[in-house]
């Protein structure tokens, strides 16, 4: 079943397919560049960087998404990604590309496993195992119900929310921070269900919900690619859920330590999906966050879990943001 270096980052180019929002010249940058790896040799790929968070380390979602692209290139078209398990062992350096080395761990009748090492400066920054499966019928089928929330059309984008905040009486440095956020091109669109909770302006349960989708058109037909994009999206704002009950503290150092993801159903990552994030536990400078990605028709598309290191400091009194 193994193949060599197939292109999995080819979106459906056949103009606007079934209700797509974008013509082909507005293909998602996630497909055209973020997840588009250069093949250097058999099972060896190179990826470059796009959005780098303010932490100045590589965005974990990008490394996971690219690792899954590399793994998927060596499995046949009839197999679907069903899970991945990763450890972030070193911070990624945004100044150099990342190499992805794929090991074809096992090809079975139903399941196929790949191990991927992401390397910079000769050392691993991520180790990832991904598993793929032939679709199989099953009498066992259940899922939790999707939370009831406002539809994305009735909610503002993060950009609109930031514009609103900029009209408040803020310190110069808070304004600068918000303007920097506005100027940053993140390849996904986000609509928080509760902006005050999303931005930690109210103390609350360690739980938040937002709608997310890839910017631009991807199209149907390439489920592996949608899983790679969902892996990218799944690392966005997930770990921050741990901080929601603690408005009196701000992050001094946060980084995800590991990330696991399970894909349950077919979905389109360029259509709105509800991301439900919660954190059941924090302690010992670590926090556990869990996420569920829902299709808007209520089908559970994917679940993920992540543990991160979180070192915090008190927010100064009288802080305006
Ligand atoms: C840093 C990792 C997690 C390993 O930590 P450690 O084993 O402690 O490594 P060191 O290199 O020894 O220390 C790193 C740093 O931490 C300081 N440190 C260590 N221990 C302590 C302590 N007990 N108390 C205080 N400080 C401590 C140490 O001094 C170092 O500080 P520095 O000298 O100032 O650097 C390592 O495994 C790692 O980095 N892994 C990679 C993590 C990663 O990159 N994850 C993916 C990116 S995170 C992400 O994507 C989330 C983005 C979210 C964006 C969004 O929400 O939208």
Image (tube, rainbow, N blue to C red):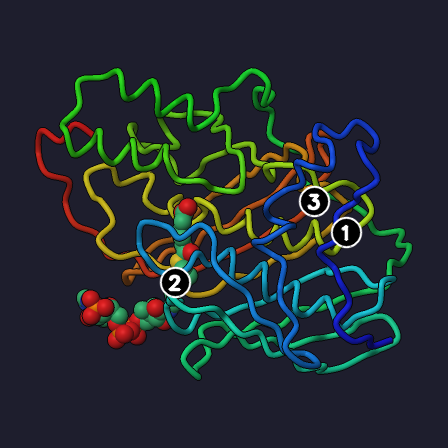
Q: Nearer the viewer, residue 294 or 67?
A: 67
Q: Is residue 104 above or below residue 214?
A: below
Q: Which residue is mark 1?
A: 223
Name the residue located 60 percent from the left edge and 79 percent from the top edge.
101
Q: Is residue 234 above or below residue 194?
A: below
Q: Which residue is mark 3?
A: 301
Q: Which mark is residue 94?
A: 2
Name the residue located 58 percent from the left edge and 23 percent from the top edge.
152
Sooner in the amino-acid sequence: mark 1 or mark 3: 1
Hey, which residue is sitting farthest left in the picture? Answer: 317
Mark toward the viewer: 1 or 3:
1
With 243 as the anchor, is 216 left or right in this view?
A: right
Q: Residues within 10 Å of mark 1 (few under 14, many from 20)?
A: many
Measure the alpha-carbon separation of dots 1 and 2.
28 Å
Element type at marker 1?
helix
Sooner in the amino-acid sequence: mark 1 or mark 2: 2
Measure the alpha-carbon separation of dots 3 and 2.
31 Å
Q: Quadrant of the C terminus?
A: top left
Element type at marker 3?
strand
């Amino acid at each position: 079943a193994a193949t060599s270096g197939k292109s999995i980052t080819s979106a459906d180019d056949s103009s606007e397919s079934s209700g797509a929002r974008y013509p082909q010249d507005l293909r998602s940058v996630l497909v055209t560049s973020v997840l588009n790896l250069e093949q250097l040799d058999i099972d060896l790929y190179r990826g470059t960087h796009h959005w780098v968070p303010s932490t100045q380390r590589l965005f974990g979602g990008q490394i996971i998404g690219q690792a899954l692209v590399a793994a998927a290139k060596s499995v046949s078209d009839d197999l679907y990604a069903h899970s991945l398990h990763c450890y972030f062992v070193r911070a990624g350096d945004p100044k150099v590309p990342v190499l992805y080395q794929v090991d074809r761990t096992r090809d079975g009748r139903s399941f196929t496993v790949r191990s991927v090492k992401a390397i910079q400066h000769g050392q691993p920054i991520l180790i990832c195992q991904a598993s793929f499966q032939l679709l199989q019928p099953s009498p066992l089928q259940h899922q939790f119900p999707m939370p009831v929330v406002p539809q994305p059309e009735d909610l503002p984008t993060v950009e609109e929310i930031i514009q609103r905040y900029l009209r408040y009486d803020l310190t110069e440095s808070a304004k600068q921070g918000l303007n920097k956020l506005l100027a940053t091109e993140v390849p996904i669109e986000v609509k928080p269900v509760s902006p005050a909770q999303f931005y930690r302006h109210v103390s609350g349960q360690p739980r938040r919900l937002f709608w997310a989708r890839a910017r631009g058109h991807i199209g149907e037909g390439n489920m592996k690619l949608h899983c790679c994009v969902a892996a990218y999206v799944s690392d966005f704002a997930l770990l921050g859920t741990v901080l929601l009950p603690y408005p009196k503290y701000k992050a001094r150092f946060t980084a995800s330590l590991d990330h696991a993801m399970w894909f349950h159903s077919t979905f389109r990552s360029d259509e709105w999906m509800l991301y439900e994030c919660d954190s059941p536990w924090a302690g010992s400078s670590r926090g556990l966050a869990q996420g569920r990605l829902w299709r808007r028709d209520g089908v559970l598309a994917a679940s993920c879990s992540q543990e991160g290191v979180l070192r915090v400091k008190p927010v100064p009194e009288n802080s305006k943001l």
